[in-house]
Image (cartoon, grey):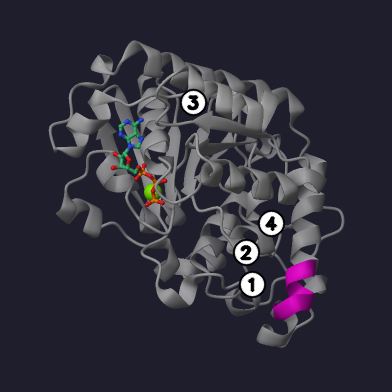
């Protein structure tokens, strides 16, 4: 299940994704956690100290390796250099699975031990001024988008992405790559304005978007969110002393997380799990083709000097069944 946490800066994306990842780890399900946020804080939020977090390999620095592995023997993709972030898989491409070892995980993922089990953590690497708003070749989130477009994840396997609701993800199609998107919103006008913008982009693409209210202090906050986002409000989270203790560098055992917050995490998982029935791999594949053509036209063809539309394998459908035959 592909799950994104998005929202305004400081709303609590990293905090809630890290809590959700910790929750999933206690269920024994395999989890890949991905930090694609501008502020790279997921590692520390999962308990890594500064040195370990700084030593995490950046996907953004390993784009060529990722592209070379994923393109495999796909005859439509002549080289890693002509592969852009939206280049879709086709016959001969290598697909990724949540549970396996592969050169992409070897190069980009590190195991993080949590109470209840280990997860794999991948990070895009720090963003620079030049990364912000770029819709092109070197985009850091492009590495994540490529992985999502080559991932055949099954039920009860989770990939959780902490990301920014930025123009980059809208230009590329990244925002359509998830089974469910949790939009973290504080009960403020700014918090819900990011929701409105996201909803607007998402409208034509069948994106499942749910709002998670954060830093909610009382009924008035809940009423406000309900009035602003209606039924899209899934659950709310209040101030957590557990989170505060963790931020002080004294993380309590995860089983000591407040009951209400634990129930909220369970509600997130239930909502994510419920989307499994809605999966439509053909639609998912068509969408990646749509965004590939869009990116090819707007900058990709010019940038690579190739006709990137020719990379599309018209007969190919990404699907979970590939797992069984591979
Ligand atoms: N429910 C909560 N209880 C207590 N503290 C919280 C809660 N949610 C968020 N915080 C605190 O608020 C601050 C911002 O949260 P966080 O870093 O998760 O936001 P973010 O959306 O990822 O921000 P950024 O845009 O900078 O990446 C952090 O100090 C975090 O510990
Ligand atoms: Mg963050």
Circle 2 — which element? helix
x then y, percent, for residue 87: 69, 65
Asked if the residues shown at circle 1 and circle 2 are in contact, with their CB atoms under 8 angstroms apart, the answer is: yes
Residue 231 among those drawn in magenta: no
Task: Provide the residue designation for mark 4.
Answer: 173
Circle 1 — which element? loop
Q: Residues within 10 Å of mark 1 (few under 14, many from 20)?
A: many
Ranked by sequence position, the earlier of labels 3 and 2 is: 2
Q: Nearer the viewer, residue 246 or 276?
A: 246
Task: Provide the residue designation for mark 3.
Answer: 221
- Location of the C terminus (image quadrant): top right
Task: Provide the residue designation for mark 2.
Answer: 71
Q: How far apart, in angstroms, are the residues tagged by discs 1 and 2?
A: 8 Å
| Mark 4 Cβ inside 8 Å of ligand 1 | no
- Nearer the observer: mark 3 or 2; the answer is 3
Q: Residues within 10 Å of mark 2 (few under 14, many from 20)?
A: many
Circle 4 — which element? loop
x then y, percent, for residue 189: 55, 42
Q: Residues within 10 Å of mark 4 (few under 14, many from 20)?
A: many
Q: In the image, what residue occupies the spot 57% across and 22% down?
A: 223
| Mark 3 Cβ inside 8 Å of ligand 1 | no
Which mark is on residue 283?
Answer: none
Q: How far apart, in angstroms, are the residues tagged by discs 3 and 4?
A: 32 Å
- Residue 209 seen in the figure: yes
Ranked by sequence position, the earlier of labels 3 and 4 is: 4
Task: Provide the residue designation for mark 1.
Answer: 83
Left or right of 181 in this view: 316 = right
Left or right of 189 in this view: 228 = right
């Amino acid at each position: 299940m592909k799950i994104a946490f998005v929202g305004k800066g400081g709303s609590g994306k990293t905090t809630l994704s890290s809590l959700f990842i910790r929750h999933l780890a206690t269920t024994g399900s395999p989890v890949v956690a991905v930090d694609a946020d501008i502020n790279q804080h997921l590692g520390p939020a999962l308990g890594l100290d500064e040195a370990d977090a700084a030593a995490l390999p950046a996907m953004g620095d390993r784009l060529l390796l990722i592209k070379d592995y994923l393109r495999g023997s796909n005859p439509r993709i002549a080289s890693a250099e002509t592969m852009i972030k939206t280049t879709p898989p086709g016959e001969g491409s290598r697909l990724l699975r949540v549970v396996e070892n592969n050169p992409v995980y070897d190069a980009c993922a590190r195991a993080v031990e949590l109470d209840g089990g280990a997860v794999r953590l991948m990070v895009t690497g720090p963003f620079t001024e030049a990364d912000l708003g770029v819709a092109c070749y070197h985009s850091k989130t492009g590495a994540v988008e490529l992985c999502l477009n080559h991932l055949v994840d099954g039920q009860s396997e989770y990939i959780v992405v902490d990301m920014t609701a930025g123009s980059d993800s809208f230009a590329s199609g990244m925002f359509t790559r998830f089974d469910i998107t949790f939009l973290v919103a504080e009960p403020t006008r700014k918090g819900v304005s990011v929701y409105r913008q996201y909803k607007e982009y998402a409208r034509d693409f069948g994106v499942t978007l749910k709002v998670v209210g954060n830093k909610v202090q009382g009924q008035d906050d809940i009423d406000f969110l309900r009035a602003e986002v209606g039924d899209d409000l899934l659950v709310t989270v209040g101030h957590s002393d557990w989170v505060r203790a963790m931020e002080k560098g004294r993380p309590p055992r995860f089983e000591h997380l407040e009951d209400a917050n634990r129930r909220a995490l369970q509600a997130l998982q239930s909502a994510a799990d419920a989307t499994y029935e809605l999966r439509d791999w053909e639609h998912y594949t068509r969408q990646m083709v749509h965004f590939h053509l869009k990116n090819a036209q707007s900058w990709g063809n010019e940038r690579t000097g190739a006709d990137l539309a020719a990379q599309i394998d018209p007969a190919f459908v990404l699907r979970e069944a590939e797992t069984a035959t591979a």
